[in-house]
Image (cartoon, rainbow, N blue to C red):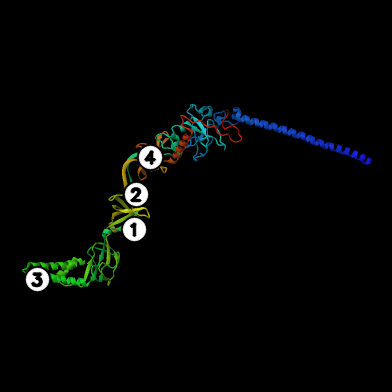
Amino acid sequence: MSDERKEGIPQNTEEKAADGPEREAPGSGNGGKSRFFVVLSAVLGILLAGVVAFYNVPAFHVLLHPHPGGDNAAESADKYTCGMHPFIISDKPGNCPICGMALTKIEGSPVPGGATTASSAIGGKPSGGARVILFYRNPMNPNVTSKTPAKDEMGMDYVPVYEDEVKGSGTGVNLPEGYATVQVGAERVQLAGIQSAAAVRETISHPVRAVGIVVPDERRVRRVQSKVDGWVEKLHTNFVGQLVTKGQPLLEIYSPDLVATQREYLLARAGSDRMKESPYEDAREMSSRLAQAARTRLKLFDVPESFIEDLERTGKVRRTVTLNAPVSGYVTGKEIFEGTRVMPGMDLLTVTDLSRVWIEADLYEYEAQAVRVGQAAVLETVADPGTRLKGRVAFIYPTFSPETRTLKVRFEFPNPGLRLKPQMYANVALDLHSVTGVVVPDSALIETGVRVIAFVDAGGGSFEPREVKVGVRGGGKAQILSGVKAGENVAVGANFLLDSESKLRAALTKMTGPASTPSQPQSPPPPQGQGDHSGHGGGR
């Protein structure tokens, strides 16, 4: 045991001697780490002090982040703006982030010492003709405003609101609700493509165009019918579409009744001739009446007058009787052939006079209310583009079509040269309302669904929105019943830009108050990671 202890002591001593240097190395490493953390803390402290100085000491802020109007304003003296959104200001050319229009250079941009800085413009008077900034508003939330330039949570710059933008943009007595006067500036009117036209006093009419179908005039359609039993012996008209003239033979019919009636008439006529020498007046009168009755019976059977005269002249009974055309026209119906047996009331032929025709067209409800019988109309056809015929409204049907919700109107037109064929399509145009009043181009009106708005050019690039009442429209023009007077100019180009700008300014004024008594601006929320600094604010 003593030997083992003696042998163990030197071993432990050697181990301690060997372990000594290894324990000192960690000690020396801890000292190096401590020095590293001390240096790192000092650097972080310096950086933190710089950040605090940047956001709280104006001198550091101006030195590191120069603004227009400061010592480095000369470098950004040129400014660019949007013709439709003057509050968009940029230091370099580009496009408007709202409407996409190219930014234009502002003539006479602010120079160092100008009056457009936040400290001198807000609430103060402009010097050197510069625009006065009333306040700044959040581009994403117009309810949030600031007296000084600022940034929102997304890092976007607050938009400056100038006095000339808010001035007069309140909801005045004559301004429609939700609209405000737009002041674009005379030099930006052309850049925005805004055009004006004068309201004049003239006559305007509302033309209506409708597609109609040519149909025969029902008053000029005649049907040839048989009034006796018989058979068709011969046809002089053998096909549909054949042109016939009044009195032209159509067919020859054999009828036992007609043959018997001819004989009765000849006998009655011969008896009347014999009784002329009778001393009895009653006998003479009776025989004459019998002869006249037999002749009338022949006429009632549609026997032509020429046939009866020939029967009286010759005194011979004819087997067949010829029927003539009652009117001139075209054969539009044929129900018989040679040898066909006919009976009383049977349709034999149909003859239609097409010298005058009807046009039946459908008009919508709002158009039909103004149509009157006798109104003039003009007709054009696709088949003959050069043809323009004048006619009139002949009849207005009393009921609407439940399927198409239209009213059928009948027009009457002449048909020279038979250019209009039945079942042909035709375009009919007629002027419903013809009035005299204040007239403006139809493009000057903005339909909102509830009302109609027009922008009146007040001069100097200022446009005033007005609610107007529209009367008759036609020919690209509209009658103005109220809202615009004769001689005033109305905007006819880029109206949608004026409409959006007017609504934007009206909403801005409603939320921030008029220019004369601006509402107390709200402080913007500080951006993340910047403490109370608002981005562009400088010192407090």
Gap between marks 2 and 4, in whole Å?
Answer: 22 Å
Other-residue count near label 3 (Cα within 10 Å), few / some / many at <14 / 14–19 / ≥20: few
N-terminal label among 1 and 2:
2
N-terminal label among 2 and 4:
2
N-terminal label among 3 and 2:
3
- Residue 367's label in the rendered image is 2
Estimate the x, y position of residue 146 in percent, counting from the top left: 53, 32
- Residue 424's label in the rendered image is 1
Asked which secondary structure carries label 3, the reply is helix
Name the amino acid type tagged 3: Arg
Name the amino acid type tagged 4: Val
Q: Residue at x 9, y 70 (%)?
A: 275
Pointer 4 residue: 468
Gap between marks 1 and 3, in whole Å?
Answer: 63 Å
Name the amino acid type tagged 2: Glu
Pointer 3 residue: 274
Gap between marks 3 and 2, in whole Å?
Answer: 73 Å
- Residue 455's label in the rendered image is none
Estimate the x, y position of residue 11 in percent, counting from the top left: 89, 40
N-terminal label among 1 and 4:
1
Gap between marks 4 and 3, in whole Å?
Answer: 93 Å
The residue positioned farthest toward the left in the image shown: 279
- Above or below residue 252? Residue 490 is above
Gap between marks 1 and 2, in whole Å?
Answer: 23 Å
